[in-house]
Image (cartoon, rainbow, N blue to C red):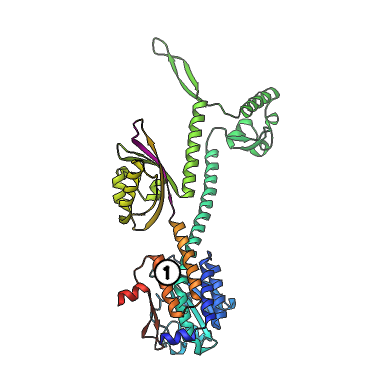
């Protein structure tokens, strides 16, 4: 296939439409909404009778029809027939016309039954993994098939990336919904516990009316739970007893605190060892419980805030070269909490910090402890699975009376997602600007350059399949690819 002829035949409006489609897809977070946007756009752009977006997932339901344009075409094929369009199920190139398929090919009968006279399948891959397939049925202008293939090849990498991101977001939403299910299950478990205890458990409002009571409470007052809820103690006890109980309740509510006692009881023996009674010791531990609860609540709030903000806090002792980390620090740096040896600063730098950043982080720390600029930098770390993350770290130094550094108290934040989002936005802007005044070949090369920057790959290129469906022709190299190829 002649690349210069392709560039000339693809109109400027078509190129701009491609950029617009890419921009819309990158902003779409729902897989089905992405499918609708893509199918409708390509339906209009290519003039095909039908455009179908098929997702390939690793879950048990491996193939999912995200959208068909027009929607009535969603029923053209059964679920099992749709799986046949997956490149992993039917590898190799498909002919443009269904009648050219072998008689025993699994797609021949469904395609002919649906009245399809032309077919174009475009695999969608991101990071080498199949994300789905685009199916274009019955192009209105057969002589534009080559141009359509060129356009779809241009669009397929960003479509695959957008599809992978949309499924990741959907998975996150499913996890949130699962968390809600777990919460409701926990509530049911709590009810099971309160109903399983012989202790009276109840809740009252400010007017002394029962909002909740377990069976033990109902049994204690001698009434069914339905006759207890919404009533106060005057409806349940004798007048004098009710006044005493309600006065105690008002005292608790007026003070805003509950009293807690630690009680110990034991038998009292006479000289012969016979039990003659019991003793009891009770200590009011209300204040201690209040302090413990306040500390626990404050710690839980801090931990929750750190998790939400992807932050962690740390305290580094200079003399011992060891650090104390908050719980979320272990998650941020992918360190097992049992491996306390990794909290030694030098060990941490050697095991977790990116090799290219190790010298800089040590120099920044030494400079700060020597009285220079504060410890404030961004650096990269590597998790045990090999993934790379970006950290923003800052610290204040505690000096002793002699002016020597004693400890550093600092915070870190995982800013990986922010960096990735910034990089994607910048790439989109650069591509949109580059599209004006450049040929399609130049735009393809620039897209490969941007893809290399985003993915960290070292070489990129586009290949097209010739009309014989066997020969591959090189369409474009990235700038690095051209340099390396020469």
Disc 1 element: helix
Return the residue found at the far front.
372
State the residue at coordinates (53%, 86%).
Answer: 115
Q: Report whether 289 appears left or right of 405.
A: right
The quarter in which the N terminus is drawn is bottom left
**396 or 48: which is nearer to us?**
396
Q: Report whether 24 appears left or right of 276.
A: right
Up-down relation of residue 471 to residue 331 (above or below) = below
**418 or 431: which is nearer to us?**
431
**Magenta-colored stretch includes residue 25:** no
**Residue 94 location in percent, x, y?**
42, 83
Up-down relation of residue 397 to residue 25 (above or below) = above
**249 or 329: which is nearer to us?**
329
Q: Report whether 283 appears left or right of 448.
A: right
The quarter in which the C terminus is drawn is bottom left
**315 or 262: which is nearer to us?**
315
Q: Report whether 152 appears left or right of 191.
A: left
| Residue 161 figure quarter | bottom left
Question: Which residue range is magenta in the image?
Answer: 402-415
Prevalent SS, magenta region:
strand
Return the residue found at the far top.
271
**Residue 100 location in percent, x, y?**
43, 89
Q: Would you name the residue on which mark 1 appears? A: 450
**Magenta-colored stretch includes residue 413:** yes
Disc 1 crowd, CA 10 A, few/some/many (<14, 14-19, 20+): many
Q: Do we see residue 200 in this rendering? A: yes
State the residue at coordinates (46%, 43%).
Answer: 303
Up-down relation of residue 86 to residue 399 (above or below) = below
């Amino acid at each position: 296939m002649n690349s210069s002829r392709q560039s000339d035949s693809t109109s400027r409006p078509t190129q701009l439409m491609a950029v617009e489609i890419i921009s819309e897809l990158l902003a779409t977070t729902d897989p089905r909404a992405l499918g609708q946007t893509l199918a409708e756009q390509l339906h209009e752009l290519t003039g095909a009778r039908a455009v179908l977006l098929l997702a390939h997932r690793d879950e048990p339901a491996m193939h999912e029809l995200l959208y068909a344009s027009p929607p009535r075409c969603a029923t053209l094929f059964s679920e099992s027939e749709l799986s046949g369009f997956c490149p992993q199920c039917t590898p190799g190139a498909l002919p443009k016309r269904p009648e050219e398929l072998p008689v025993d090919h699994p797609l021949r009968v469904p395609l002919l039954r649906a009245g399809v006279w032309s077919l174009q399948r475009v695999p969608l891959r991101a990071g080498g993994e199949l994300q789905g397939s685009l199916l274009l049925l019955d192009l209105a202008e057969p002589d534009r098939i080559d141009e359509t293939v060129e356009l779809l090849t241009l669009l397929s990498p960003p479509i695959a990336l957008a599809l992978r991101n949309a499924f990741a977001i959907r998975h996150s939403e499913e996890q949130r919904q699962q968390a809600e299910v777990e919460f409701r299950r926990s509530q049911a478990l709590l009810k099971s516990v309160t109903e399983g205890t012989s202790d009276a458990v109840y809740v009252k409002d400010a007017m002394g009316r029962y909002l909740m009571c377990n069976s033990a409470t109902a049994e204690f007052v001698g009434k069914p739970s339905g006759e207890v809820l919404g009533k106060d103690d005057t409806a349940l006890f004798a007048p004098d007893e009710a006044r005493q109980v309600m006065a105690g309740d008002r005292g608790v509510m007026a003070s805003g605190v509950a009293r807690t006692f630690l009680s110990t009881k034991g038998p009292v023996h006479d000289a012969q060892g016979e039990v003659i009674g019991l003793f009891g010791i009770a200590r009011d531990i209300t204040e201690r419980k209040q302090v413990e609860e306040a500390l626990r609540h404050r710690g839980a709030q801090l931990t929750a805030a750190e998790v939400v903000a992807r932050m962690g806090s740390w305290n580094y002792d200079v003399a011992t070269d060891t650090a104390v980390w908050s719980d979320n620090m272990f998650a941020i740096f992918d360190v097992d909490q049992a491996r306390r040896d990794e909290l030694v600063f030098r060990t941490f730098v050697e095991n977790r910090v990116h090799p290219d950043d190790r010298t800089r982080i040590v120099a920044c720390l030494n400079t700060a402890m020597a009285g220079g600029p504060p410890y404030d930098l961004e650096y990269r770390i590597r998790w045990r699975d090999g993934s790379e993350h970006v950290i923003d770290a800052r610290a204040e130094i505690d000096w002793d009376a002699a002016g020597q550094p004693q400890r550093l108290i600092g915070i870190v934040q995982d800013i990986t997602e922010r960096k990735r989002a910034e990089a994607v936005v910048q790439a989109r802007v650069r591509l949109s600007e580059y599209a004006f005044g450049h040929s399609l070949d130049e735009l393809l090369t620039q897209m490969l350059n941007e893809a290399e920057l985003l993915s960290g790959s070292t070489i990129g290129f586009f290949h097209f399949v010739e009309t014989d469906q066997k020969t591959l022709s090189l369409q474009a190299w990235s700038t690095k690819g051209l340099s390396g190829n020469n």
